[in-house]
Each structure stands twice: as structure tokens, then as C-alpha cells.
Image (cartoon, helix red, strand yellow):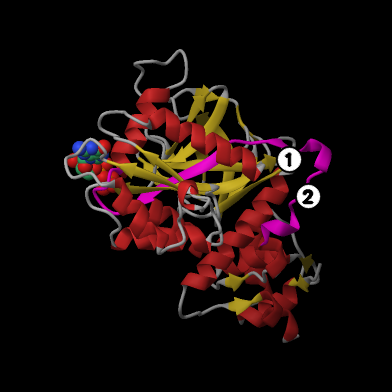
Amino acid sequence: SETLTVDELAAKLNKDASEIIKKLMFLGVMATKNQDLDDDAVELICDEFGVQVEKEIILEDTDFDKYREEDDEANLIERPAVVTIMGHVDHGKTTLLDAIRQAKVREGEAGGITQHIGAYQVENDGKKLTFLDTPGHAAFTSMRSRGAQVTDIAVLVVAADDGVMPQTVEAINHAKAAEVPIIVAVNKMDKEGANPDRVMQELTEYELIPEDWGGSTIFVNMSAVKHEGIDNLLEMLILVSEMEELKANPKANAFGTVIEAELDKGKGPVATLLVQNGTLNKSDSIVVGSTFGRVRAMVNDEGKRVQSAEPSTPVEVTGLNDVPQAGDQFLVFSDEKKARQVGEARQQKHIQETRSETTKVSVDDLFEQI
Ligand code: GDP
Ligand code: MG
């Protein structure tokens, strides 16, 4: 790459060459006036003199697509569907998520305390499903605004005693925009005044038409508080996921999306990642949004430490340098150095995008003026 001599850099910084040489000595480098300095040395010296150097970022270097390899068809295997629960406030989303979790905690941990990591997996007849435990609307809006799509199937919860409400319509719009299939869960069937026919009638206006009426939308009547209809809903979800033919390559470097993240006093940055392709392993070098690091520890939705996470699996990871944002994407790199480079470039890009006024000189400017 380009170089500057000590003399040239001194001229640019309006300093005497001897001052530069002194600084270099301080940094453990013996140099003469005509010594060539590389980018890193130039930056270090500038830093010593309080001059900020803006590193030039090659835009494509920050683009994950550049580093993702095409998956060999032969490596693709079936993966569990990722399900988001949506619907109007108080129609029973949280109650349903809890009911499913309680009904289907995996064998061996019955009664165990499940950890909240923003998503969980259940097993039904040997088939897994992944549920996003974050509010459906948020999952769609914040993630989609960042270009991430994590949901494969949307469950639209509609209270049988209340019918279609404004957020019901919003949810339908989100799911349709994402081209995600919708299963309607007609909830609160136990309540007096429950009127599932009215719900069906109202939803025809949004092209959600039950099979009995000549449409293709699956409707499941249920009661989340009474734990009724849960198995049927899960069966329908499995059915739809099979029709979707969801595939992933477990041999690839892991790629996916941040479900949620926070700073933990003891553990540092903690992020729940949904692996969408590849397998995430402990010690992997990973770039997440505009930060990076190495996966120090991974905990699954049961609160157990795991060594790896396959496609559609949510895991909580530690080891990142900073807290990413929900909806950020992540990618694992085989080469730790490359991960650092890409991570730093994305970090730099993020800083530049968020900083309004700039008081920096670019390395290019420094070189050009000679
Ligand atoms: P969310 O806002 O959609 O997450 O709704 P919640 O799950 O918080 O439920 C709102 C209220 O409806 C709570 O008081 C629940 O106990 C109640 N609820 C949820 N599901 C049912 C149901 O199937 N039957 C009855 N009777 N009440 C329900
Ligand atoms: Mg809720």
C-alpha cells in the first residue's frame, strides 16, 4: 500500500521530523527522516498528535453478501419454520406463546425454568418449530427496516369475542408485505359471546378465506388460557412449514439475525441470535451488525450451554465487543483477521453514518498533498 516518509508526514502535520522520530522511538520504532511509514504507522503518529485520520472504507468490504458462499444444493437440509405471533393488543398473543411453551417444553426439562432469550423452540411429533417471543409487530417493523426477514409463518391471533381490530389489519399487512403465509388462531373460544363465524366473515375482506368457504387459509379455534386447540395449531404450523420446503445448509458459516441484545453488567454485550443458515459454533469469529467478536459462550432457550447451533435455532451469545441492535445481521468468518477487518470497517461506517459534522483528514488527503 501507499507510504509516506517521516519527512513528508512531518510537513503535513506541521511538525519537525525530529518530533516524529521521537514519537516513533516511543512506540519502539527506530526511524530515519527518509523512512517509509505505512498506513498504520501514519495513523498512530497522527493519533499521538491528536489528528484524527479517517480510514478510507471500501464500501463492498462491509457487505456480507460478498463473503457468503453459495450453498451447494446437496448440502441443503430441512430446517424448522420460524413463527411469529401477531394480532391486536389483548387478543392473547403472550398467553398463546406461554401456553405453547408450557405444552411443549422439550423432554427432560419438564418443570424446568425456561430462560427468556427472545425466542424458543418446541417439538411436536419429532418436528421442531421456532417461535419468536418478541412482539410480532416489532419483529416485522424493526427487522424489515434493516432488510432482515426472519419469519416463515405468521400466526394471526384474533379474539373470538372482539373480532378484527386495527392492529389485526396492521398485522395482516405486515405479513402480506413479507409474503409470509398466515394461519388464523381464533382465540378466546371459551368466552361468552365468542363468535368465530364473525371473525371469518370479517377476515374475508382481507382475502383470508377458510377452506370451507372456498379459500385456502387455515383457521384454528382455540383458547389459550384453557390450553385448548394448541396441538391443532402446532399441527397446522408443521403442515404449512412442510409445504414451504424450508431449507438451509448446516455446513456453511453461520448467518442470521439479532433477535434482541443488551448490555449485561456481568457478561458484557449479550445478544440472542437466530441462526438462519449454517451452524454457529463456540469460538467462531463473528461480525454482528457494526460490531464483532468471538463467540465466548452460547446458551440455548432452555438456559443450557451449547457448543453449536443449527439453522432456525435461537441462541444467546456473549463475546461481542459491543451491543448490536435487533434486526442486525451476523456472519461468521473462518478467518479471524478477516472478521476483525470487516467488523472494523462496518464499525467505522456506522460511526460515519451517525456522526453529523466531520473534523477529520483522510489518509488520501494526506497523501495527495505531496
Ligand atoms: P396480548 O396483548 O395479545 O399479548 O394479550 P395477552 O396474552 O396479554 O392476553 C390479554 C388478556 O386476555 C389476558 O387477561 C389473558 O388472560 C386473556 N386471554 C388470553 N387468551 C385468552 C383465552 O383464550 N380466553 C380467555 N377467556 N382469556 C384469554
Ligand atoms: Mg402481549
Of residues 30 and 12, the one nearer the viewer is 12
The reply to whether the C-beta atoms of the residues labelled 2 and 1 are less than 8 Å apart is yes
Q: Position of residue 15 (x, y in %)?
A: 61, 78
Residue located beneath label 2 in the image: 69
| Residue in the picture at 42% in, 22% down | 105
Q: Residue furthest left?
A: 192
Is 32 left or right of 255, judged from the image as shown?
A: right
Q: Position of residue 303 (x, y in %)?
A: 43, 25
The amino acid type of the residue labelled 1 equals Ala
The amino acid type of the residue labelled 2 equals Glu
Residue 316 can be seen in this image:
no
**Quadrant including the N terminus:** bottom right
| Residue in the picture at 26% in, 38% down | 189
Is 58 left or right of 218, judged from the image as shown?
A: right
Q: Residue furthest bottom?
A: 369
Give me the disc on residue 252. Answer: 1
Q: With respect to residue 53, does 325 lie above or below? A: above
Does residue 83 show up magenta in the picture?
yes
Q: Is mark 1 within 8 Å of ligand 2?
A: no
Q: Position of residue 344 (x, y in %)?
A: 61, 57
Residue 186 can be seen in this image:
yes
| Residue in the picture at 19% in, 39% down | 191
Q: Position of residue 326 (x, y in %)?
A: 45, 52
Q: Quadrant of the rendered structure where residue 53 is?
A: bottom right
Q: Return the disc, 2 or 1, that comes first in the chain's sequence.
A: 2
Q: Quadrant of the rendered structure where residue 4 is?
A: bottom right
